Image (cartoon, rainbow, N blue to C red):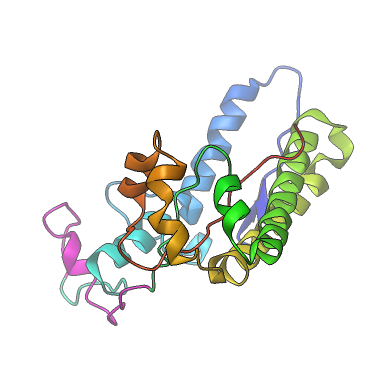
């Protein structure tokens, strides 16, 4: 396991219980900021005092950046809001994507005049997603000598998913006329589609996460 704030190597050594080594490594991950104890929202100075993932999400919940209180306060559920009095965080821009039906938008795309460009962007995302899954499978089940490099490549490729979705797929709007036809196109799924998508507002395509390796 490695990152810019720490590196741990786990090897099979005679007389050493690998479970203990793995548990110690998980503890290190928590200490590096992936998690946090009930008493802390940031890591120790050994790990650059980085905010935990919980603190990052909590800042969104409270609508302000993490900031240590001016006067010492014991962290608890009741006092947590006092740790998020920093710069305000505005509401994000949310794209109203159509929940993916079981056919992967097939019926919608068949009626969409812009289906060629939409399909190209959907397939590009699926290809990138599938390459990540293949890399993770190779890291776990392939030759140990190249596992670390393979895993690193897979993690790096995750950045591609953000670009391929935000700057490509989410720009394609589902024509309003097709949205009106969704109850007819997907009578057995329309309740779920309406649960996760505001069908009264403009609707856009979203990534399908199709694994093309299977």
Q: Position of residue 212 (x, y in %)?
A: 74, 40
Q: Can residue 157 be seen by looking at this rendering?
A: yes
Name which residue lies at 26% across and 63% down: 61
Q: Can residue 37 be seen by looking at this rendering?
A: no
Say which quarter of the image contains residue 187. Answer: top left
Q: Could you say which is closer to the camera, residue 68 or residue 54?
A: 54
Q: Could you say which is closer to the camera, residue 15 or residue 207?
A: 207
Q: Which quarter shows the N terminus?
A: top right
Query: Which SS type dominates the magenta stretch?
Result: loop
Residue 111 is inside the magenta segment = no
- Above or below: residue 165 compared with residue 211: below
Say which quarter of the image contains residue 188. Answer: top left
Q: Position of residue 208 (x, y in %)?
A: 58, 48
Question: Which residue is farthest left?
Answer: 78
Is 86 on the left-hand or right-hand side of 122? Answer: left
Q: Which residues are magenta?
A: 72-92
- Above or below: residue 199 compared with residue 192: below
Name which residue lies at 66% across and 56% down: 122
Name which residue lies at 54% across and 31% down: 23
Question: Which residue is farthest top?
Answer: 15
Q: Position of residue 191 (x, y in %)?
A: 32, 40
């Amino acid at each position: 396991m490695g990152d810019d704030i720490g590196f741990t190597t786990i090897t099979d050594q005679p007389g050493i219980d690998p479970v203990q080594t793995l548990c110690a490594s998980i503890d290190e991950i928590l200490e590096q900021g992936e998690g946090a104890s009930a008493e802390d929202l940031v890591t120790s100075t050994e790990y650059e005092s980085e905010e935990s993932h919980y603190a990052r999400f909590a800042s969104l919940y409270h609508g302000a950046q993490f900031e240590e209180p001016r006067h010492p306060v014991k962290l608890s559920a009741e006092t947590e809001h006092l740790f998020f009095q920093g710069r305000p965080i505005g509401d994000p821009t949310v794209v109203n994507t159509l929940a993916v039906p079981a056919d992967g938008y097939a019926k919608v795309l068949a009626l969409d005049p812009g289906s060629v460009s939409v399909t190209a962007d959907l397939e590009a995302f699926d290809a990138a997603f599938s390459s990540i899954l293949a890399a993770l499978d190779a890291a776990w089940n392939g030759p140990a000598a190249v596992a670390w490099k393979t895993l690193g490549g897979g993690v790096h490729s995750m950045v591609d998913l953000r670009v391929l979705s935000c700057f490509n797929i989410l720009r394609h709007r589902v024509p309003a006329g097709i949205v009106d036809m969704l109850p007819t196109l997907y009578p057995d799924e329309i309740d779920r589609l309406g649960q996760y998508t505001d069908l009264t507002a403009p609707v856009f395509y979203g990534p399908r996460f199709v694994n093309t390796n299977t």
